[in-house]
């Protein structure tokens, strides 16, 4: 148990430059508190003490502002940063080394009891603040979910997803360098780039049409002057 606690503390120090000491992390990081309260509530849940598990989870929510259902499965070195408003549903699974920021929801879209209703996050996934991942699909290893995105379908490993509904703006294998809030510097959204190109092309067409209209106007004026001269 102490080894796991040391591992969780080391992960926080690695991913949060604001963490100055082990004591500060132990006392002031609600994400760490929520995860360890979840370990207790899940133990109750797995031993068929379901009400006690839910009550322990409820106490954890009251203390930390983070709601983790005791049925949810969390891997090792999961870091919930800031954490207020995070909701992790009953059938959610969070892989080793994932980072989840405040306001994230791992929610379900089905009311079927016993079904896989909540998402599975692979290893090393980063979920930006306010993102909603809804449904019983998988987000692949090392994927990044941008802040405030709404993801309703599977995400391949290594992909970066942004927007409402979420769309992939970067796919395939990439660097394992940690990206806070799933933000990658100098990363371009291909959809936004395509729209910008369309806007620029439309502006060029407008300038061309305006030039043609001016030429036509001059030709009409010249023709009227010629006709008056003939008369």
Image (cartoon, grey):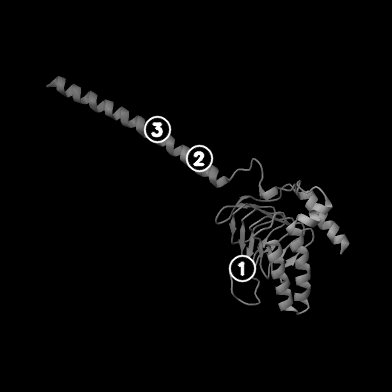
For label 1, the residue is 108
Q: How far separated are the C-alphas under marks 3 and 2?
A: 15 Å
Q: Is residue 228 above or below residue 43?
A: above
For label 2, the residue is 197
Q: Sequence-wise, which precedes: disc 3 or disc 2? A: 2
Q: How far separated are the C-alphas under marks 1 and 2?
A: 38 Å
Q: Sequence-wise, which precedes: disc 1 or disc 2? A: 1
Q: In the image, what residue occupies the spot 67% across and 50% down?
A: 181
Q: Locate the N terminus and report the quarter of the image it occupies.
A: bottom right
Q: Residues within 10 Å of mark 3 (few under 14, many from 20)?
A: few
Q: Nearer the viewer's eye, disc 3 or disc 1?
A: 1
Question: Quick one: which residue is furthest to the top in this view?
Answer: 229
Judge from the rendering whether residue 229 lies leftward or rightward of residue 18; answer left or right: left
Judge from the rendering whether residue 216 lies leftward or rightward of residue 170; answer left or right: left
Answer yes or no: do the residues labelled 3 and 2 have beta carbons within 8 Å? no
Q: Tag on residue 207?
A: 3
SS for tag 1?
loop
Residue 57 in which image quadrant? bottom right
Residue 110, image x and y in percent? 59, 71
Q: In the image, what residue occupies the spot 47% across and 41% down?
A: 198
Answer yes or no: do the residues labelled 3 and 1 have beta carbons within 8 Å? no
């Amino acid at each position: 148990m102490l080894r796991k606690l040391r591992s969780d503390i080391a992960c926080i120090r690695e991913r949060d430059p604001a963490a100055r000491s082990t004591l500060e992390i132990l006392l002031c990081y609600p994400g760490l508190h929520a995860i360890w309260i979840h370990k207790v509530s899940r133990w109750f849940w797995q031993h068929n003490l379901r009400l006690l598990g839910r009550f322990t989870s409820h106490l954890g929510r009251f203390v930390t502002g983070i709601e983790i259902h005791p049925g949810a499965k969390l891997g090792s070195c999961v870091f919930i940063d800031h954490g207020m408003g995070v909701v992790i549903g009953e059938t959610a699974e969070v892989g080793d080394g994932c980072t989840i920021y405040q306001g994230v929801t791992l929610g379900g879209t089905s009311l079927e009891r016993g079904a896989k209703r909540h998402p599975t996050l692979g290893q090393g996934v980063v979920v930006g603040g306010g993102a909603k991942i809804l449904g019983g699909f998988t987000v692949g290893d090392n994927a990044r979910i941008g802040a405030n995105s709404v993801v309703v379908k599977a995400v391949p490993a290594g992909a970066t997803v942004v927007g409402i509904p979420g769309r992939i703006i970067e796919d395939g294998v990439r660097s394992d360098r940690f990206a806070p809030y799933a933000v990658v510097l100098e990363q371009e959204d291909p959809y936004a780039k395509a729209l910008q190109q369309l806007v620029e092309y439309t502006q060029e067409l407008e300038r061309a049409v305006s030039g043609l209209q001016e030429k036509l106007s001059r030709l009409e004026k010249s023709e009227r002057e010629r006709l008056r001269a003939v008369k």
